[in-house]
Amino acid sequence: MTLKSESELQLMRESGRLLALVFAYLDDKIETGVSTMQINDWAERYIVDELNARPASKGQYGYQYVLNTSVNQVVCHGVPATTQKLKSGDIVNVDITLEKGGFIADSSKMYLIGDVSPLAKRLVDKTYAAMWEGIRVVKPGATLGDVGYAIQQYATRNGYSVVREYCGHGIGREMHEDPQVLHYGEKGKGLELREGMTFTIEPMINQGKAKIKTKRDGWTVVTSDKKLSAQWEHTIAVTANGFEVLTLRDEERI
């Protein structure tokens, strides 16, 4: 675990700010009829040409693309494809990383395509709220168990299950640093949070059971019962008095 200095945090703020701009750029482009590969290509061009930054996912672990697009029952790591076109009623998570000045920011956002069912919209909204339940307990002296407990309790209280195989992670000069940030846990358990820690909180919440499986491509993770899954993600810094969301978008209010 690496504690970030104020100068390092300033660089991470800039990466986070730029990543928020990528989502703002994509917001009015992601709609019915768009392919998930188009989303990938738009993001890559904007990150490289407009922001003079690096899409940090491309080439990581042999991955060819700059983002993940996880549609409907896909939990995470959905691979963009020219043949996969969004249709009315779909929900899609777009997960993007960006490196600038040697530091990486990581964030994801759900998009509702066309006429989405009330049950699908509820899942998306409650997953977003579950992420914030976890974020709001972040402060020096709290524990990672507190974060996971807050997310898990909110999700289960609303009738959903929490994916356990994938979690948040420390982030900074590397995309994946210590610690692992589980989205379930016990109050008071786990690593104690300290000022200068930076990590992601990114709960994957399923409409049905928590059980998942990986498809034959070795990347795409789906729900075993084929029910919907949703995810939101932000990069967080622990501050002297609480937390700072480094990837906060303009439309969001803490």
Image: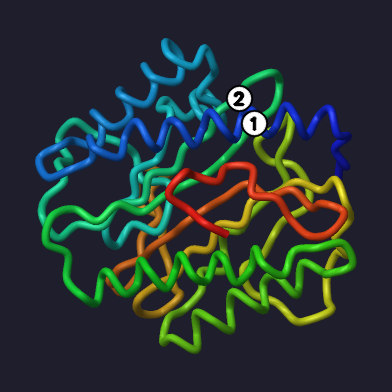
Crowd around label 2: few <14 · some 14–19 · many ≥20 (10 Å): many
Q: Is residue 254 above or below residue 10?
A: below
Residue at x 28%, y 72% (from the top left corner): 227
Which residue is tagged 2? 99
Q: Where is residue 167 in the image (x, y as percent from the top left)?
A: 61, 58
Residue nearer the viewer, 80 or 237:
237
Residue at x 52%, y 44% (from the top left corner): 107
Q: Quadrant of the C terminus?
A: bottom right
Crowd around label 1: few <14 · some 14–19 · many ≥20 (10 Å): many
Q: Which amino acid does label 2 sit on?
A: Glu
Residue at x 55%, y 26% (from the top left corner): 56
Q: Is residue 198 above or below residue 64?
A: below
Residue nearer the viewer, 237 or 166:
237
Which residue is tagged 1? 104
Residue nearer the viewer, 5 or 36:
5
Dot 1: element:
strand
Q: Earlier in the sequence, mark 1 or mark 2?
A: 2
Name which quarter of the figure residue 131 lies in.
Answer: bottom right
